[in-house]
Amino acid sequence: MPEGHTLHRLAGHLTDAFAGSAVRVGSPQGRFAHAAALLDGQVLEGAEAWGKHLFVEFPGDRFVHVHLGLYGTFDVHAQVVDVPDPVGQVRLRLVRIDGTAYADLRGPTACELMTVEERDAVVARSGPDPIRPDADPERAWDRVRRSRAPIGGLLMDQGVLAGVGNVYRAELLFRHRIHPLRPGSTLRRGQWQAMWDDLVELMADGVRTGRIDTVRPEHTPDAMGRAPRVDDHGGEVYVYRRHGQACHVCGATVRTEVLQGRNLFWCPRCQPPFRSRAVR
């Protein structure tokens, strides 16, 4: 499933390609046909993301809400000469009225027309998004500090923190030497603030580059004399999808375990299990 930086990049591409222009709105597949007819010929005002939710705005406080889910794609093609016929199951097609750009949405979990009140309700159910300048880390901290649930699960709860997926989860915990099964309530306020600040920077980098790079300069392939990572997710990472391999920092074997249906990745030496001082 795409992580939050992907949705923010997509919102930027849609805004650049269509904002301020009238668009033809269609649903070649037919599943969004009624809503598409209501929007066809209107001016697309812009697009924005909140976590893993995308909102494309049209006049009259109407929003197309998109959640890509596991299999969805939204391909934006700008500065084109010709607009080809749609290929495959295209749920939503946007075409600039002058024919210079088009975008095709395929396989999303959600594609629906919303009022501003419905859009606000989706946002209200979501945690703060570290990429957004209006994000409030205290909202997430209030949930984390009161929960005995593993921090590895809390970070993936979109009601706690919006936009964080499995890659950012694994890498953030490694960078802060926190075991993924540590209860959220055992974190100190300073630890949470450091993690939040790190997420803000890492995810903003992801928006700019389109990939997730989390290793520090001293651990890059060039600095360590190692081969670059080869993975369909791209980017240089410490532990994500590196189970059974040596940790770049200490050499211990990276481990994996399933939590809430998703794979955790961590280094047992760099991220030792939490032990309460009361127990010690």
Image (spheres, helix red, strand yellow):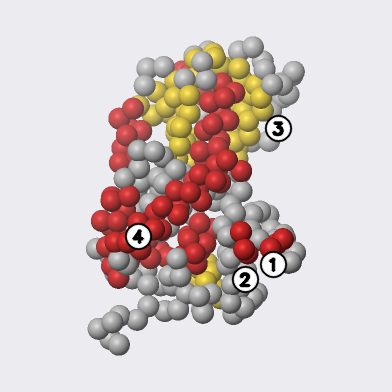
**Residue 72: x and y, percent?**
57, 43
Question: Is residue 63 something one can see in this rendering?
Answer: yes
Rendered residue at 57%/25% (across/down): 16
Q: Are marks 3 and 2 in contact (CB under 8 Å)?
A: no
- Mark 3 or mark 2, whichever is nearer to me: 2
Residue at 65% from the left image edge and 74% from the top image edge:
245
Mark 3 residue type: Val
Query: Mark 4 and mark 2: span between their CA atoms?
Result: 24 Å
| Residue that numbered label 2 is attached to | 248
Q: Which mark is residue 224?
A: 1
C-alpha gap between disc 1 and disc 2: 9 Å
- Mark 3 or 4: the one toward you: 4
Tell me what residue is drawn at x 24 percent, y 63 percent: 146
The residue lying toward the viewer, choosing from 153 and 131, is: 131
Give the mark, 3 or 4, whose residue is nearer the N terminus: 3
> Crowding near pointer 1: few (<14 within 10 Å), some, many (20+)?
few
> What amino acid type should be assigned to the residue bearing mark 1?
Met
Taking depth in this image into account, of 137 and 8 the one nearest to the observer is 137
Where residue 3 appears, as percent x and y from the top left, is 52, 49
Crowd around label 2: few <14 · some 14–19 · many ≥20 (10 Å): many
Q: Residue furthest bottom?
A: 280
The amino acid marked with disc number 4 is Trp
- Residue kind at label 2, given as amino acid type: His
Q: Which residue is mark 4?
A: 192
Residue indicated by mark 3: 87
